[in-house]
Amino acid sequence: PNQSEANLRSPICCIMGHVDTGKTKLLDCIRGTNVQEGEAGGITQQIGATYFPAENIRERTKELKADAKLKVPGLLVIDTPGHESFTNLRSRGSGLCDIAILVVDIMHGLKPQTIESLNLLKMRNTKFIVALNKVDRLYGWKACRNAPIVKTMKQQSKDVQHEFNRRLTDIITQFKEQGLNTELYYKNKEMGETFSIVPTSAISGEGIPDLLLLLVQWTQKTMVDKLMYRNEVQGTYLHHKEIKAAQGIKITAQGLEHAIAGTSLYVVGSHDDLEDIKESAMEDVQSLLSRIDKSGEGVCVQASTLGSLEALLEFLKSPAVSIPVSVISIGPVHKKDVMKASVMLEKKREFATILAFDVKVTPEARELADKAGVKIFIADIIYHLFDQFKAYIDNLKE
Ligand code: GTP
Ligand code: MG
Ligand code: NA
């Protein structure tokens, strides 16, 4: 029987927090990968999902002697960006998940995007675990690779323990100021009321077993209903008897080249109204179109996915940047995009520019741009597009 506790789907866990707290590095540490150093500028600019099968979790937690307690088939973990322009992706990530990990840098405490993440989680009533990361940066820290945290703490000098407790107390106070009770997880007697803190290092792996075990135990204990397979479709995931939910699936269909990366998947059931669903499907795109400058004057903006386009528009709109946008597009820069940009040559020459994030420019588009006098700036970090455009404008003024 599918609808039973013995057949739970994998919980979806979202990693959130302020920039550079170590969200991606924590995932790298769990996966045994090195994604973070391959990211442009070490910045996460997309949502990414990783599946950890139960046997990996079992392996990583075996020192905690919790073997028999695993009932879920694994964990699906979603990494999100911490930079401020990416509120949209944090919001989407937190909207998809059953539980979250809120990463706080022990050396820095709560920061603006920690609080923003907290508010998103509160709004959706999503439970979370705090990973108090970078404990290895405490002065005099003695590394105990991948060891459980209680064992690790016992190895530390009195000075390190004192420094740890001082910072922990400060951070618990900062959470209190946000209206939340938090406590070290192994001292937490009221899980649910009081949020648990797990000290971690993404570099030497201390506390990772505790974090994984707590995630799995807590979701199994409190979310059994939510984790049982269902047959209907929810949100971005398709539940189907031939696949396990909460996993990535590859879709083959006609006309898929017109689908926009990062938008939702809708399945039309026999009782659904196709027109209603079409309308919902267009909502994401419509809300983007509403950001286009009404004057019709502005640069052209192009990005690889809906999410990164939203983030780029958010950034261009911010007061310190304030670049008007007249045309938006998703995917590679083609000749037709250059033609659209060239309309600005007559109105405002400096806006005859394409700001392209994480996309390719076809040779024909490049050729036409050179001929027509349309500027194309490409960058793999959204913030660099501003620097390039600003340098160009300053140059024009001179
Ligand atoms: P964004 O996605 O850009 O918001 O950053 P992030 O939260 O994913 O942080 P990231 O994993 O990119 O790590 C930021 C920096 O902190 C990198 O230089 C990491 O090597 C470093 N770092 C992450 N975790 C730890 C840790 O536990 N200890 C130490 N010493 N450094 C860490
Ligand atoms: Mg990251
Ligand atoms: Na980073």
Image (cartoon, rainbow, N blue to C red):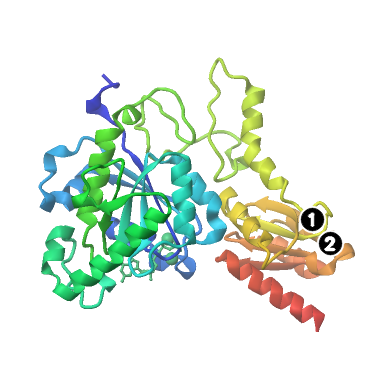
Regarding mark 1 in the picture, which secondary structure is present there?
Answer: helix
Q: Residue at x 55, y 23 (%)?
A: 268
In the picture, which quadrant includes the N terminus? top left
Which one is nearer the viewer's eye here, 260 or 177?
177
* Residue depicted at 12% across the width and 38% down the height: 68
Residue 387 image-quadrant placement: bottom right
Q: Residues within 10 Å of mark 2 (few under 14, many from 20)?
A: many
Q: Is residue 93 visible?
A: no
Mark nearest the camera among 1 and 2 is: 2
**In which quadrant will I find the C terminus?**
bottom right
Q: Amino acid at mark 1?
A: Lys
Residue 264: horizontal and vertical position, in percent?
Answer: 54, 37
Label 1 and label 2: CA atoms lie apart by: 8 Å
What amino acid is at disc 2? Met
Where 173 falls versus 307 (above or below)? below
- Left-right relation of 168 to 90: left
- The residue furthest right is 346
Q: Does 44 sit left or right of 68 as displayed?
A: right
Give percent across and percent down for residue 390: 70, 74
The residue wearing badge 1 is 340
- Disc 1 to disc 2: CB gap under 8 Å: no
| Residue at the spot of label 2 | 344
Q: Position of residue 207 (x, y in %)?
A: 22, 58
Q: Secondary structure at mark 2?
A: helix
The residue lying at 74 percent from left, 66 percent from top is 367
Q: 361 and 148: which one is in front? A: 148
